[in-house]
Amino acid sequence: MKFTTLAHLMDVELLREAYRLTRKDGAPGVDGVRAKEYAANLEVNLADLHERLRGGRYYAPPVARTYVPKEDGKKRPIGKPAFEDKIVQRAVAMLMGAIYEQDFKDCSYGFREKRSPHQALHELRERCMNEHIGWIIDADVSAFFDSIDRGLLREVIKQRVNDGAIMRLIGKWLNAGVLEGETLSYPELGTPQGGVISPLLGNIFLDHVLDEWFEREVKPRMKGRCFLIRFADDCAPRRRGKEAGMAT
């Protein structure tokens, strides 16, 4: 089923719930507004936000970007969206998540309700032990959130959710730009780092291009038993013995 009318569900009540679920201790975005300041006049702010969304006048501000060091000496980009933008992203993620949770494969554990890294590791251990798995391939999609093809992402989403207002919001977030210091840039690839909506968009894309591909193309070509465990853009395909190599 394709959903074409979702935006009307984004009423003040949903925005209020999205506000409740949004972390309040994060750094402010480009507008400098903190959660405490937004909460001081919450109902008026939410009502105004709802009117802007309903009238198509909502503006997605650029994401402020900083960097934190990684263990390997490289730096990881961290995005800081505006607090109000986090509320809107949370509301859209709530609506879309209710749909896609019915679609996501059991092998996917990252950024999903009632799923955790510990569950992924437990499933991995149990299946390796019970199915006598002998080969493990640990894989990571390099710079996934920075390099995802936005055109392909939108095509994948439209196969399930093709609400014009929701798609326009996603387009605004993808093209909002990145502010580093005083430099504003507009990358052609990737999803907004630090955005509430980004983990869901990533899962939607990887469910289509990786999880479905593994089930449809890889497993039928294997001579032995195999399975996939994925946490966001980190995955670990497992194979049983040398005879499980992929047929060519």
Image (tube, helix red, strand yellow):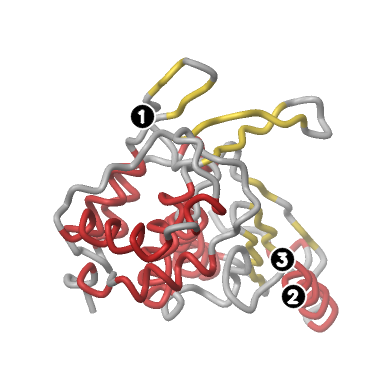
First along the sequence among labels 1 and 2: 2
Residue 74's quadrant in the figure? top right
Q: Which residue is mark 1?
A: 188
For mark 1, give the secondary structure.
Answer: loop
Lateral position of residue 130 relative to residue 56, left or right: right
Q: Nearer the viewer, residue 235 or 34?
A: 34
Distance Cα–Cα, label 1 vs label 2: 35 Å
Q: Residue type at mark 2: give it.
A: Gln
User: What is the C-alpha distance between the residues marked 1 and 3?
Assistant: 37 Å
Amino acid at the residue labelled 1 = Glu
Residue ID for mark 2: 119
Q: Amino acid at mark 3?
A: Arg
> In what element is the residue under mark 3?
strand
Q: Are marks 1 and 3 in contact (CB under 8 Å)?
A: no
Residue situated in front as seen by the camera: 247 or 137 = 137
Q: Which of the two labelled residues, at mark 2 and mark 3, occupies the earlier sequence position?
A: 2
* Outermost residue to the top: 182
Q: Is residue 28 depicted above or below 177 in this figure?
A: below
Q: Residue at x 57, y 70 (%)?
A: 112
